[in-house]
Amino acid sequence: MLPTWTEIFYVALASIISFMLSLHLVRWWIHKAHEIGLTGKDMNKPEEIQIPESGGIWVGAAASFGLLVFIALQIYLSKYNEYNLELMALALMLFMSSFLGFLDDILGWKKGLKPWSKIIYMAPLALPIVVIKAGYSIITLPIIGPVNLGLLYPLVLVPIGILGAANAFNMLAGYNGLEAGQGILLMLFTLIYSWVKGLHPSLEASAIMLAAILGFMIYNWYPAKVFPGNSFTHGLGAYYAAIVIMGNFEKFGIMLFTLYFIELALFLRGLKDGVYKENFGKVQPDGTILPPYEKVYSLTHLAIKVLIKLRGYAREKDVTLFILSLQVIIGVLSLVLIRYV
């Protein structure tokens, strides 16, 4: 069911507030992070440039506040509270996942939470979504048809999906504007799909998060003035999985997430070869970058190789644009093909 004009006004107002709050908080954080020394080297630049870390925590804060604004507008002005339980759980989960990522950021890159400890600490993140029993336990399998998974869906599959997406989104990162750009595209295509299908509260949630990321992107696009950090990647990955589950469009959500499955396959290829890959390129004095390995262990490595073959050189911004272009193609194909899957 498409939203009413009143609902459109509410979500537009909440999105504007989310955008403005993200914009101002990130601007404030850039100065504060420099003061307290929470900065990191911009790895794909030849110069020694220190950039504020973990600006993504404010994206999570802004989007959470935007969700609360939307809920408040419905309750106080329309006495309408459908989907508010789901949105409240979503805001809580976003805050929790962003905070965990922030904790990892402030403990130090490569010195923060160990991979095994992250899994343990992140396990409770799905609780807000599990507690409200979000999603639908009936799924359609090829040949077999509809299958009711019962409690297996909310208690097992939902946590796996949320934790998996939170960790996967962190794998394709490390370039100015890449994580935020991917977040914008994921939310945009999710918003379009939710609008066409009339899906709530995924429509409202994707619009509010999209606005928050746009506010952040102003300072994160090349040359970046702030990094997103794990507070952004963990938070957005979990958020994306949650709205897919709430909207019951797992097929479309998985299709839209294709680049991350490819990134996982390339990562496993690296492990097979004894390489724990990094996405950064080999920076040259003129600012161009070369592949860090002979083989391709990340989509960023593939982008560098393709750009060098086509243009003779690769730069950081071009790598970001290359991958974002792939995501646009996948998004359009997902919208077209979902009716046939």
Image: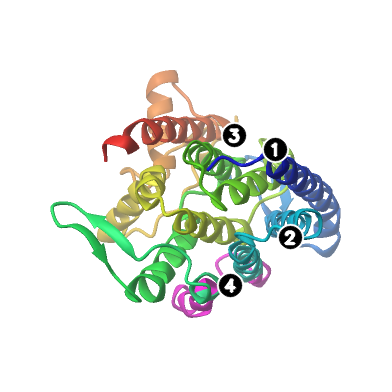
4 vs 1, front mark: 1
Q: Is residue 219 above or below residue 245?
A: above
3 vs 4, front mark: 4
Q: What residue type is labelled 4?
A: Gly
Do residues under tags 2 and 4 come within 8 Å of each other at their CB atoms?
Answer: no
Check disc 1 and report the residue beneath it: 5
Relative to 328, 337 lies left or right: left
Please say whether residue 54 is visible from this viewpoint. no
Q: What element carries label 4?
A: loop
Q: Which amino acid does label 3 sit on?
A: Pro
Q: Separation of disc 1 and disc 2 at Cα? A: 19 Å
Check disc 3 and report the residue beneath it: 285
Q: Which amino acid does label 2 sit on?
A: Leu
Residue at left 33%, top 75%? Answer: 152
Q: Considering only order in the chain, which callout, 4 or 2, is on the residue closer to the N terminus?
A: 2
Q: What element carries label 3?
A: loop
Check disc 2 and report the residue beneath it: 68
Q: Separation of disc 2 and disc 3 at Cα? A: 48 Å
Q: Considering only order in the chain, which callout, 3 or 2, is on the residue closer to the N terminus?
A: 2
Q: Is mark 2 on a helix, strand or loop?
A: helix
